[in-house]
Each structure stands twice: as C-alpha cells, then as structure tokens.
C-alpha cells in the first residue's frame, strides 16, 4: 500500500462509489490509518439501518424486513472485505494493531444485530405466503442464524454470548498474528555446499531468492513457507538439517514467549464449550455440526473411522518399505517424521521411476494457470483476459476479467501466487465483493492467494504436482464465487454448509490429473515441449503412492479437532499437548507421522471458527467429489456439456439456494457412495 499518510490524502472509504476499473478498492490511496475511522463510520451507519428496520411501525414483510436486512451494511462490507483481505495477504504492524482493536468490536456488532429482540420479532413475523423459492430460503436461513446466535435466550444469556463472541474474536486474531510471527521469524540458513547436499537446481534457486528477499544476497535460506520446506524435507540428504527444519515447522505456536498459542487454545475451548451450553448443546461440536450436511459429530466420526482403518494399514506397509530402504543403505536409525518425505520420494523413484525434480520443469506456474483457465473454458465457457493496469495491493497480484460465452462480464479474478513475509501461510480463496442482484447486477471480485516459492533470477516458478493441485483446488473455490447466480447476498457464492464448501474445490482437482489436460498444458518451461508420454503415465501411475501417509496426517488432524470440541476437559482447563497426545494414542497414530496441523498452529480451527469442529469436511467433501467426477466418466467425456451444465446450475452457480443434500441430489440424481473415495485414494480392499 501507499506510504502517503492519511492526513495528506482524501479518505477513499468516504467516497460513495469507487470509479476504479471494476470498482476495485483504490489500493494505492489506502493507508492503515484510513481503516479505523472507516470502520467507525460504517458501524454507526449500519446501526442506524438496523434500528430503522427493527423500529419500523409497519407490519413485518419480506420486503421491509428481510430484504432491508440484506441491503443494509453495504459500507461495512466494503471496509471489512478490503481490510481482512489485506491482513491475510499483505499485512504490517499498523494493520495488525487495527485488527486487534476491531476484531472484538465487530464481533459485538454482529451479536447486537442477531440478539436484537425487536429485529428478531420482525423476522419471526414475516409471512411465508407468496414467497419465491429463493426468498423462502433466505427467510429460513435468517431464522436459523438468529436462533443459533441466541435470539431466543433470556437477556443475561444474550449478554454473556455477546461477551464470549468478542473475546473469541480477539483470541482468534492473536492466534493468527502469533502464527505469522513464528513463521516469519524462522530461517534455516544453508551456509555451505555441504548444507545444500541433495537439493536440485530449482530448490537451490528458490532458496537463493528467499535469502535475497531477506537481505542475504548470495546465500540460501529455507523458510517455513510450505513450498520451500516441503521440497527441502524431500530432497535434502542432511538428516540433521531436515530435523531442524521439521521441528521448527511442527513447533509453530508452541515456542514459549509472547507468540505461544497454547493458553489461547485453552481459553478458546473453554469459551466455545460455554457458548454451546448456553445455546442448548452438550458440546461445541454438536452445536457446530447441527447446521451441516453431516448433521452430527457421530456422522463425521463414522466417516473418519471408516477411512482411518484402511489408511493405517496402508501407512504401515509404506513405513515398512521405507525402513527396509534405510537398512539396505546401512542406516541404523528408526524412520522419523523428518525422514518420511525424503525416503518416500526415493522409493517412488525406485518403484515408479519418477522423481519430483523430473516433473517440475513441466509445471511452470504460468502453464498451470493456463490449464486451470482452459478447464474452466471447456466446462463452463469462461474466458480470462489479463488486465495489466488496475489497482492492486501488491505488485505480484495479477488481475483477469472473466467473461461468459456470450461476452457478458462474470467478474474479476485476482491471483496472488508468491510467498512473502507479509502473507500468512497456506492457500485460500476470498472475495473483495460477492455476486448478488438485489441492489443491482453486482459482479464478484474473487482472489486466490498462494505461497509458492519464486524461481531464480530470470527463471519461472516451477510447481510440484502437489502445488499444481493446490492451485486447481483454490481455483475451484474461485469458480464457486465467480459463477454464483443468486439474487440475495446471504446465499451467494461459497456461503454454503461447511462440509459442502470443499466440493467445488476438490472436484476441480480431478481435471488436473486427466491425461487430456496434462498433454495440453504440461510443457517444459525452456523448450515448450510437452511432457513425454512415458513420464505422464508414470506420474499418473503413482497417484496413489504414499496415500496411507497422506490420509493419516490429514485424518489425525480432523479427529483431534473433533475430539477437542467434544471433550469436557475444556471446562476444567486444557493441557493442549497432553490432550493431543492422548487423542492420537487412542487411534493408534503411527509415531513416524505427525498431524498435518498440530493444535498450536491449527489456524483452520483457532484463527477463527470457519473449520472449528469441521476439519473433517475435506474428507466429507472428498466423498462427494470422487462420486461427482464419476458422473463425467459415466458420460464418457470429462467435459460432457450436459453434466457440466448441471454442475454449474446446482453446485458452482447455486450458492445456498437449497440445502447441501438437495443440491447434490439435483446434480447427481442420488446421494454419494464412499466407494469412489476409497478407490481414488488407493485404500479399497
């Protein structure tokens, strides 16, 4: 963002409309100092709007109550969407200070809205006769939101719920900022050629670029960006350095001092349990899953257990083969978590004549982006035109106008692909603006944020196959936002059940693995030659390699998440590491594998509530996506127009027009089977 101070620039948030292309935020004119005053004005305006709705003397109707609610808060949405996109993808100490101040205020504001007795009385009184299907759905969702926020409770319980919400917002913000601080603080400096042993050219180049960005030109650095640390653990032949890097990775948020997240987790769990009890639920997990496709913790745990047993057997077989390789080479040590990726890659070379260094030259970032765009064109008729001259919050960000078959503007897509210290780890999709038609034909502005390692000087960023899959995954989320085709903001885009929201993203990953797509887009970054057919077949033949490990590290995190949110220990004071260790002991967690996300850095569930008691949803959605892609196989064409049209109408474009089971059944004609998932992961008996 611009370094111009607020007192020398007009406040962009005071402008009623932005005249930038696509009405993008004018990032070059926005400073951290603008946000708190902008929030103050927007909150005050929203309070006035809500008071007018709640105090309307006319009988409650859909138009003067529900539609009025949907139209309210526009100024607040504009400020908040800009602010929170920046705090995730390009933050600084000034923005973090504003975030700490605003998080509890915004939580209290939301509580005041949903705990307003006069407003709830009007929403309850709205008649259902004559409503369209979409209007009836909006009314039902509002009533559900009010009840789940505590609208039916007595005043003292409402007051306590509001205090809990404010405190949880502050804790989630601190958790996230602590995690970013730990991730930004760690660097493993590779001092000598011996330290670089085993690292292929692409990884040396990425480590050199990371060192240069941190003021250490001419050296090599490994950071805690997954696109750097994962390949380092794969290729480094220095077992001692692998252990140092891995230990730093799994100890994020658990290093003592100001950035330690364990006390935050304990307080968070205690408050979530209290909130659930006030709302009439035995546990937070029961509360959270009552409004999902699964419906209950038992349903989610049943799925995880059904997958855990075959995955653990498979992981045991994988471990034995890796330990045998160590013995063959004269090693006298037991396989450890920092060894698994290294020896698995070497075993993959042996069993499938395949290594990551051979694949990456055929997966330059630009080619994978083109593959994602081309797949969207063939499925949904979308076209993408890059816009070089539009406002952006960082020079790395790229903007693309998205159009439909008839030339109609669908929306704007932003891609922010590279890791940097100002960005939190991981990959995600978000929106600067969501689609709706209530206040006009509003097109969405959707952003994908990644953390890929840059290539060396003058070289492109080369992706692993897992990186490419991440790009397709997040672009599937982006399409869910871009293709939204609803009238009411409450139902737009990804505003669906938590265990349904991953279906569009995980389903989109399937197209990356199709020979037809790889033959067209997997091309050598220097020569432009297509991936050799032999390499392509070896790559696809290894798809289920190491899936025991991959399933175990994910499922363990999902099980611990549910265990935490089903436990009564939160009330008595939670010893986070001890609880995690006992939970893993009960399920027989292999000692050679660690959870994908240990609790002190499990941002999915503690940097907010989006996936709290809901990390299982990736596996739940995988049941759906594996079954859904079979619809294209059964049609005999992975781009079958009729199947794609149903997919767009009932999944990607439908938002929350219908509940998840009805939406999936409308697309597929039935609910899914678990069999395609087990087959996809190579876990079928």
Image: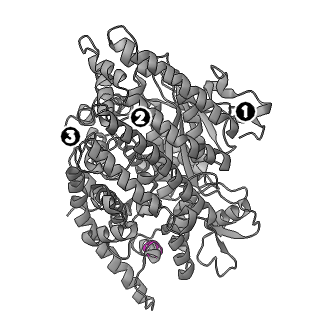
In front of the other: 360 or 598? 598
Tell me the magenta residue range.
340-345
Residue positioned 42% across, 21% down in the render: 69
Pointer 2 or 3: first along the chain: 2
Q: Main secondary structure of the magenta part?
A: helix
| Nearer to the camera, 415 or 115 | 115
Mark 1 or mark 2, which is nearer to you?
A: 2
- How many numbered marks have been drawn onto this rendered protein structure? 3
Residue receiving disc 2: 111
Residue of label 3: 671
Q: Is residue 239 magenta?
A: no
Task: List the residue tagged with mark 1.
Answer: 29
Return the x and y of residue 83 as percentages of the image width and height: 59, 38
Please state the horizontal and vertical placement of residue 446, each as a whole percent of the image.
52, 35
User: Which numbered disc, 1 or 2, marks the residue that appears first in the sequence?
Assistant: 1
Label 2 packing within 10 angstroms: few (<14), some (14-19), many (20+): many
Residues at circles 1 and 2 in contact by the CB criterion of under 8 Å? no
- Secondary structure under tag 2 reads helix
- Is residue 631 shown left or right of residue 349? left
Number of the front mark, 1 or 3: 1
Give the image quarter of residue 644: top left
**Decide: marks 2, 3 in contact (CB < 8 A)?**
no
Cα separation, mark 1 vs mark 2, equals 32 Å
Disc 1/disc 3 C-alpha distance (Å): 50 Å
What is the secondary structure assignment of the residue under circle 3? loop
Where in the figure is residue 123, as x and y percent of width and height? 32, 20
**Residue 162 position (above or below residue 492):** below
Q: Quadrant of residue 652?
A: top left
């Amino acid at each position: 963002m611009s370094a111009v101070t607020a007192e020398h620039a007009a406040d962009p948030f005071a402008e009623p409309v932005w005249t930038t292309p696509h009405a993008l935020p004018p990032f070059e004119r926005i400073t951290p100092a603008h946000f708190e005053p902008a929030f103050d004005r927007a909150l005050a305006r929203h309070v006035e709007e809500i008071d007018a709705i709640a105090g309307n003397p006319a009988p409650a109707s859909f138009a003067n109550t529900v539609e009025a609610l949907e139209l309210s808060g526009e100024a607040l949405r504009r400020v908040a969407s800009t602010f929170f996109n920046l705090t995730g993808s390009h933050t600084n100490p000034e923005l973090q200070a504003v975030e700490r101040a605003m998080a509890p205020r915004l939580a209290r504001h939301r509580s005041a809205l949903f705990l307003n007795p006069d407003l709830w009385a009007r929403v309850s009184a709205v008649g259902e006769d004559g409503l369209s299907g979409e209007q009836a759905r909006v009314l039902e969702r509002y009533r559900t939101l009010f009840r789940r926020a505590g609208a039916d409770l007595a005043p003292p319980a409402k007051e306590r719920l509001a205090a809990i919400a404010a405190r949880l917002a502050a804790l989630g913000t601190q958790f996230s900022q602590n995690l970013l601080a730990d991730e930004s603080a760690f660097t493993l400096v590779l001092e000598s050629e011996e330290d670089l042993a085993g690292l292929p050219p692409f990884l040396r180049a990425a480590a050199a670029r990371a060192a240069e960005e941190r003021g250490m030109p001419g050296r090599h650095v490994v950071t805690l960006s997954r696109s750097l640390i994962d390949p380092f653990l794969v290729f480094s032949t220095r077992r001692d350095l692998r252990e140092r890097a891995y230990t730093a990775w799994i100890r994020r948020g658990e290093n003592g001092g100001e950035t330690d997240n364990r006390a935050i987790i304990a307080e968070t769990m205690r408050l979530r349990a209290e909130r659930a009890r006030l709302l009439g639920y035995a546990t937070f997990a029961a509360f959270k899953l009552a409004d999902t496709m699964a419906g209950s913790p038992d349903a989610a745990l049943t799925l995880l257990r059904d997958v855990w047993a075959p995955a653990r057997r498979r992981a045991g077989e994988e471990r034995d083969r890796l330990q045998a390789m160590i013995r063959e080479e004269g090693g006298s040590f037991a396989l450890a978590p920092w060894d698994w990726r290294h020896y698995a890659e070497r075993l993959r070379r042996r069993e499938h004549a395949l290594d990551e260094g051979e694949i990456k030259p055929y997966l330059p970032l630009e080619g994978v982006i083109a593959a994602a765009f081309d797949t969207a064109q063939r499925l949904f008729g979308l076209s993408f035109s890059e816009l070089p001259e539009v406002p952006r919050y960082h020079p790395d960000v790229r903007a693309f106008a998205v159009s439909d078959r008839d030339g109609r503007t669908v929306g704007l897509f932003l891609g922010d692909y590279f890791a940097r210290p100002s960005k939190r780890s991981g990959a995600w999709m978000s929106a600067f603006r969501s689609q709706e038609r209530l206040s006009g034909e509003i097109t969405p502005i959707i952003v994908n944020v990644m953390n890929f390692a840059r290539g060396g000087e003058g070289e492109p960023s080369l992706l692993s196959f897992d990186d490419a899959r991440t790009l397709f995954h997040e672009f599937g989320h982006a399409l869910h936002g871009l293709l939204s085709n609803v009238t009411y903001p409450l139902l737009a885009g990804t505003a669906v059940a938590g265990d349904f929201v991953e279906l569009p993203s995980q389903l989109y990953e399937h197209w990356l693995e199709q020979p037809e797509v790889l033959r067209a887009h997997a091309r050598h970054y220097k020569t432009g030659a297509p991936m050799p057919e032999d390499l392509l077949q070896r790559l696809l033949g290894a798809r289920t390699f190491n899936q025991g490990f991959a399933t175990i590290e994910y499922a363990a995190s999902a099980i611990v998440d549910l265990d935490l949110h089903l436990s009564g220990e939160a009330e008595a004071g939670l010893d986070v590491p001890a609880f995690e260790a006992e939970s893993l002991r009960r399920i027989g967690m292999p000692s050679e594998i660690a959870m994908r996300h240990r609790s002190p850095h499990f941002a999915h569930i503690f940097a907010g509530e989006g996936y709290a008691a809901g990390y299982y949803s990736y596996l739940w959605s995988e049941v759906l996506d594996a079954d859904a892609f079979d619809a294209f196989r059964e049609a005999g064409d992975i781009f079958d127009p009729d199947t794609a049209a149903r997919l767009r109408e009932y999944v990607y474009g439908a938002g929350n027009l219908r509940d998840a089971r009805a939406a999936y059944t409308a697309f597929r004609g039935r609910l899914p089977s678990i069999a395609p998932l087990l087959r996809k992961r190579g876990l079928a008996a």
